[in-house]
Image (cartoon, helix red, strand yellow):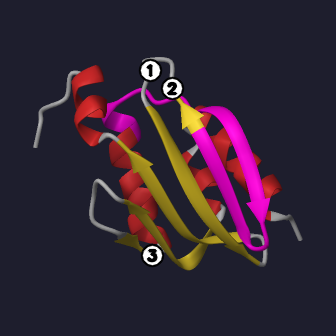
Amino acid sequence: MKNPKEVLMKWVEYFNNADIESLTALYAEDAVNHQVANEPVKGIGAIKEMFENEFASAEMTCIVENIFEDGDWAIMEWKDPLGLRGCGFFKIKNGKIVFQRGYWDKLSFLKLHGLPIK
């Protein structure tokens, strides 16, 4: 079984390669991904669809600044090449992500990627 930090490091690798299949496989069937700027996404199918939509609309890169592990949790501070910063919290059970919460500035993301402000 992989510890939370190892799972998160794989998540970053797959995210940076836009490898949606491998990325989605890291989640439990009933996982919840809640990026606080958006509504929570529930279930592995909906999470896969979210990643498909996000990677289709913007080129994203996660540069790890810090990773911390505490029990079932892996916590990451990150930045991207355009200057956006954020943090993510990943609860891992049996080697799978069961809950993820991310904090980042949605307005800055939309502006940096030239996307419509909703």
Distance, label 2 to label 3, CA atoms, is: 27 Å
Residue 27, numbered circle = none
Q: Position of residue 19 (x, y in %)?
A: 59, 42
On screen, 114 above or below 71?
A: above
Which residue occupies the foreground of this view, 65 or 47? 65
Quadrant that contains the N terminus: bottom right
At 60% from the left edge and 42% from the top edge, which residue is drawn? 77
- Labelled disc at residue 80: 2
Is residue 62 inside the magenta stretch?
yes
Tell me the kind of residue under disc 3. Answer: Gly
Decide: few, some or many residues near mark 2? Use Cα within 10 Å; few <14, some 14-19, many ≥20.
Answer: some
Q: Magenta span covers which residues?
A: 55-77
Q: Would you identify the image quadrant in which residue 17 lies?
A: top right
Q: Is residue 49 above or below residue 92?
A: above
Question: Sequence-wise, which precedes: disc 1 or disc 3?
Answer: 3
Which residue bears the numbered disc 1? 83
* Secondary structure category for the residue under label 2: loop
Q: Nearer the viewer, residue 16 or 78?
A: 78
Mark sitting earlier along the chain (2/3) = 3
Where is the C terminus found, in terms of image quarters?
A: top left
Q: Secondary structure at mark 1?
A: loop
What amino acid type should be assigned to the residue bearing mark 1? Gly
Is residue 113 visible to the viewer in this orientation of the structure? no
Which element carries disc 3, helix, strand or loop? Answer: loop
Circle 2/circle 3 CB separation < 8 Å: no
Q: Is residue 8 visible?
A: yes
Q: Nearer the viewer, residue 108 or 17?
A: 108
The residue beneath circle 3 is 43
Q: Is residue 54 left or right of residue 96?
A: left
Instruction: State the image coordinates of residue 115 (x, y, percent, origin top left).
Output: 19, 29
Q: Badge 3: few (under 14), some or many (20 or more) residues near its Cα, within 10 Å?
A: some
Q: Quadrant of residue 99?
A: bottom right
